[in-house]
Image (cartoon, rainbow, N blue to C red):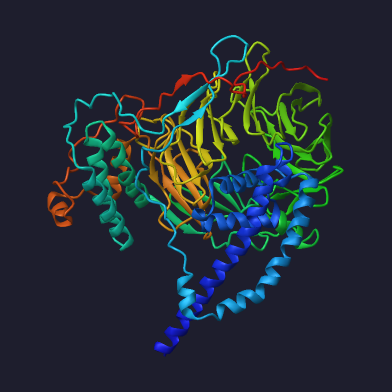
């Protein structure tokens, strides 16, 4: 039986742990600042070698997630660049050894500090209370202020091959739409405060266990948004309203697996063509989970692919680093630390084949579109093609002068693009091994490549810029930049006409692929953006209007936000307060957004083509709407709108943010700008 004495000791233990955590962070932060200052003062060519790797990076990433307000903008960029380099490829051996020696030296300080920590814990409680740091800032679901500073990105010239120097001022504010109200709707302007109150009540009812009332409250809030006249109030109100509805329709299911604390090492793969998530756990297990709609069930067997092959520590260290899954999501290839790789069946857990032949560690792998071949890149500067079923070596592609960090097949599997630390991008014929094209012009290691949907261009990123190379020499190649920011990663949209890029300051910018013009910058992001997932067109039974695509961003604070892909506006935060996601994606048909939480749970959220679709489906799930008496009882403002009021889909091309308009940046020339925005590149046939 507990009493006041036990409560007193429990408070003491909590205070001791709090004080120890603050001291641990203080001592670590001092060492971290020294490394950051060395990196910031170094020459650009030496910066990649000074980025964090391994355990120091994992510790820095965890502290950044726990105490984001304690990091300066420069320190945050330092960690984000380190994570981008670590997750996209294995760092060079020289940088690895340098950071390993640095981490060993860093272990001396924590050992010496152990005695100091013990002494400080014994200090009087008055001193401990004075040491308590102010509460951390929490992510707010309210829209961000429109007073944020403007950013500038470069705009390429419209014609000719001569580089044109210029920038584009991107206004972060949301301009009101000029789209007129829908004539068939009774336009009513409800106060945004009442809508936010309804959304808050919806969340309260849902958390109290009344899911139906919670959903009905969110539906009422969203109906009021849809009936508001166009303008900024409608744009500001849709965030809490849409958030409450989508959260009410989300399903969270435990996976029964503890995710690794070492977040810098990849621990999750989401199959883009099959509704399956591949999870690596702390114990080195790899487990697959199939998800469909709102349900999640463990489908694939647990496995320990390292067990029959050697010490488990190797597989545990690498986890899913450099791994790849076939399009059918039935096979997985795992690089090993002994210059080999193995293919396993996800359902059986058995090894199917083993690849041997590289003269150094493998950095990454990739399956062909038909799943029959596997490509591997390594530190021996070669790319090899293997038979997935037998492990037989088919081709060795030689020509690179550095470690391979990027691989990608085209849609038909007849070509493969490779790139790496030699700053070149090469394209090979997968049947003959002949080099079809080689592009130069990159200023640093190329860390990612991808073919355009039609196969006529190759996107490559690295060194802070995104290059779009064209096979046709008459087509102008593009270089996308954002002055003052480093573009860490990029992906081409399914239409092939736009590119979404993530920068080191946590912003995400959409560019036109043919001109390099920035279209918009994502708004209302949940803090700094860590990654972006692209959704396919929504296909749902009984829905005629299929709408456009969605973007889902994963923030460094673990929040997940869904954006309109045509405008960039974020209109709903999918994660609950306190929940942190580590990976995001979409179901194969685009009908659901998928998020893996650090707690070892998976969240599936239905996506809707428009506000009207969301209201129809949500109303059917709830079995009705709030009536005027319910709204009066809730003290949530004006009377209920009611289910009988029709909500139509607007024809303005913006089915979700029905008032928001894309930002229209204006070009202005800046004298003395050094970065060139466009170049003309010629594809060299062979060597």
| Residue drawn at x 43%, y 36% as measured from the top left | 149
In the displayed structure, would residue 171 be above or below residue 145?
above
Q: Is residue 410 left or right of residue 127?
A: right
Dividing the picture into quadrants, the one containing residue 311 is bottom right
The residue drawn where x is 40% and y is 37% is 540
Q: From the viewer's side, name the closer residue of 588 and 175.
A: 175
Say left or right for 238 vs 318. left
Nearer to us in this view, 1 or 279: 1
Name the residue furthest top: 160
Left or right of 528? Residue 544 is: left
Q: Is residue 301 visible?
A: no
Question: In the rendered view, would you say 459 is above or below 217?
Answer: above
Q: Is residue 439 above or below residue 133?
A: above
Residue 298 at x, y = what percent?
55, 57
Residue beneath the point at 32% across and 47% down: 245
- Considering the image in quadrants, where does the C terminus appear? top right
Count of numbered badges drawn on the protein: 0
Residue sitting at 77 percent across and 50 percent down?
96
Q: Nearer the viewer, residue 277 or 382?
A: 382
Image quadrant containing the N terminus: bottom left
Residue 589, position in %: x, y?
48, 38
- Answer left or right for 127 relative to 23: left
Residue 264: x and y in percent read 63, 52
- Quarter of the image for residue 325 reads top right
Q: Quadrant of residue 188?
A: top left
């Amino acid at each position: 039986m507990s009493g006041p004495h036990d409560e007193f000791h429990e408070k003491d233990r909590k205070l001791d742990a709090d004080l120890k955590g603050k001291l641990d962070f203080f001592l670590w932060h001092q060492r971290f600042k020294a490394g950051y200052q060395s990196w910031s003062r170094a020459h650009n060519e030496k910066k990649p070698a000074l980025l964090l790797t391994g355990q120091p990076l994992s510790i820095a990433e965890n502290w950044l997630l726990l105490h984001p307000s304690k990091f300066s903008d420069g320190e945050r960029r330092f960690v984000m660049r380190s994570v981008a380099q670590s997750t996209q490829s294995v760092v060079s051996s020289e940088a690895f050894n340098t950071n390993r020696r640095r981490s060993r030296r860093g272990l001396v300080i924590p050992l010496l500090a152990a005695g100091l920590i013990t002494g400080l814990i014994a200090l009087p409680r008055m001193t401990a209370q004075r040491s308590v740091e102010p509460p951390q800032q929490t992510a707010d679901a309210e829209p961000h202020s429109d007073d944020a500073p403007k950013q500038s990105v470069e705009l390429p010239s419209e014609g000719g091959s001569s580089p044109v120097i210029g920038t584009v001022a991107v206004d972060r504010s949301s301009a009101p739409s000029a789209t007129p109200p829908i004539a068939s709707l009774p336009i009513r302007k409800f106060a945004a405060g009442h809508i936010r109150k309804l959304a808050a009540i919806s969340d309260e009812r849902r958390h109290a266990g009344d899911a139906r009332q919670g959903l009905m409250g969110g539906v009422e809030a969203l109906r009021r948004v849809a009936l508001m006249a166009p303008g900024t109030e409608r744009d500001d109100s849709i965030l809490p309203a849409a958030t409450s509805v989508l959260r009410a329709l989300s399903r969270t299911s435990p996976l029964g697996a503890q995710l690794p604390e070492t977040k810098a090492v990849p621990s999750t793969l989401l199959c883009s063509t099959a509704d399956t998530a591949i999870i690596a756990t702390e114990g080195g297990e790899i487990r697959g989970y199939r998800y469909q709609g709102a349900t999640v069930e463990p489908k694939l067997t647990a496995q320990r692919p390292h067990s029959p092959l050697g010490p488990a520590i190797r597989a545990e260290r690498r986890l899913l680093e450099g791994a790849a899954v076939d399009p059918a999501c039935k096979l997985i290839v795992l690089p090993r630390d002994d210059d080999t790789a193995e293919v396993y069946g996800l359902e059986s857990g058995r090894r199917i084949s083993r690849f041997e032949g590289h003269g150094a560690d493998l950095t990454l792998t990739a399956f062909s579109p038909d799943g029959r071949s596997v490509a591997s890149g390594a530190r021996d500067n070669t790319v090899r093609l293997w038979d997935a079923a037998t492990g037989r070596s088919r081709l060795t592609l030689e020509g690179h002068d550095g470690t391979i960090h990027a691989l990608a097949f085209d849609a038909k599997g007849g070509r493969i693009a490779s790139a790496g630390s030699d700053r070149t991008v090469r394209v090979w014929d997968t049947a003959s091994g002949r080099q079809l094209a080689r592009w130069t012009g990159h200023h640093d290691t190329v860390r990612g490549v991808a073919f355009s949907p039609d196969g006529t261009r190759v996107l490559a990123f690295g060194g802070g810029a995104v290059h779009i190379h064209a096979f046709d020499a008459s087509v102008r190649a593009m270089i996308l930049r954002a002055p003052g920011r480093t573009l860490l990663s990029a992906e081409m949209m399914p239409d092939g006409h736009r590119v979404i890029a993530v920068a080191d300051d946590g912003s995400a910018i959409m560019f036109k692929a043919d001109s390099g013009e920035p279209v918009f910058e994502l708004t209302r992001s949940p803090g700094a953006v860590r990654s972006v997932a692209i959704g396919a067109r929504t296909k749902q039974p009984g829905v005629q209007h299929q709408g456009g695509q969605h973007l889902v961003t994963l923030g460094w604070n673990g929040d997940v936000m869904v954006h309109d892909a045509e405008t960039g506006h974020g209109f709903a935060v999918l994660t609950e307060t306190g929940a942190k996601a580590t990976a995001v994606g979409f179901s194969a048909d685009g009908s659901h957004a998928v998020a893996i939480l650090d707690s070892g749970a998976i969240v599936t959220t239905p996506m809707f083509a428009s506000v009207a679709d969301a209201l129809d489906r949500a109303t059917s799930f709830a079995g009705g709407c709030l009536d005027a008496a319910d709204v009066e009882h809730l003290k949530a403002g004006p009377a209920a709108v009611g289910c009988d009021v029709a909500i139509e889909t607007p024809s303005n091309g913006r089915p979700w943010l029905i008032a928001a308009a894309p930002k229209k940046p204006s070009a202005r020339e800046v004298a003395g700008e050094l970065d060139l925005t466009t170049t003309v590149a010629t594809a060299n046939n062979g060597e």
